[in-house]
Amino acid sequence: MASLKLINNRFLILTFAFIGIAKADPMPNTATLLIKAPEIQANKKIFNLDAYKTLECPLKKKLNSSHPDYLGRLHYQVAKGDEVIQREVSVSIDSPIMLSATFATVDGDNQSEICYYQSHSFWPQAGKTYKVNFLENCTVKAERIDKSGKATEVKLNNLVDTCFNQTKN
């Protein structure tokens, strides 16, 4: 998150707030997430992904930028046509991560669709890489990718798991 300040109409000060999210670098206390939005052809596509460091049920506290465990926006992108929406990020492994996203498509004046991907969480492991695919049917699939490229499915806790079943990876 960056902010600009103009002082005495002369000096421009650029400040940065580090929120635990950065471009993927191999660090011992991080995991890498390979994020990918649905591959849909549309005049306009908008993808927004926020992250929280919690496994707490979001029915108790709303998931928004005021939430005490808000890590920040992992990705926001507007795309056109068949442009792919994807990003690689590093996340801290000192707590679970809860992902909450929206994906919207707009085709013309009268046709739009939106998917809400609410409260999908897991606890990433240090040095591991995870492929997180947000699918067209409004579901999320996650896989841990080992050094040889082999994928192993990762169980994501969804809203029902988090709020009612209390399961944990």
Image: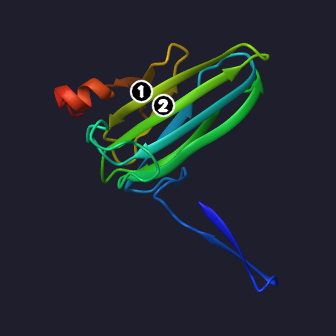
Percent across and percent down for residue 38 are 59, 21
Instruction: Report whether 137 appears left or right of 70.
Output: right
**Residue on which disc 2 sits:** 131
Does residue 9 appear anywhere in the picture?
yes
Q: Earlier in the sequence, mark 2 or mark 1?
A: 2
Helix, strand or loop at mark 2: strand
Q: Characterize the local packing of mark 1: few (<14), some (14-19) or many (20 or more) Cα atoms within 10 angstroms.
A: some
**Residue on which disc 1 sits:** 143
Percent across and percent down for residue 131 are 48, 31
Q: Is residue 60 above or below residue 167?
A: below
Helix, strand or loop at mark 1: strand
Q: Is residue 163 above or below residue 141?
A: below
Does residue 84 appear anywhere in the picture?
no
Q: Is residue 102 above or below residue 49?
A: above
Percent across and percent down for residue 54 are 30, 46
Disc ID at residue 34: none
Amino acid, disc 2: Lys
Instruction: Report whether 113 appears left or right of 19.
Output: right
Residues at discs 2 and 1 in contact (Cβ within 8 Å): yes
Label 2 and label 1: CA atoms lie apart by 5 Å
Percent across and percent down for residue 110 are 74, 13
Give me the residue at 53% from left, 36% from top.
Answer: 34
Amino acid, disc 1: Glu
Q: Quadrant of the C terminus?
A: top left
Give me the residue at 79% from left, 16% from top.
Answer: 108
Q: Quadrant of the N terminus?
A: bottom right
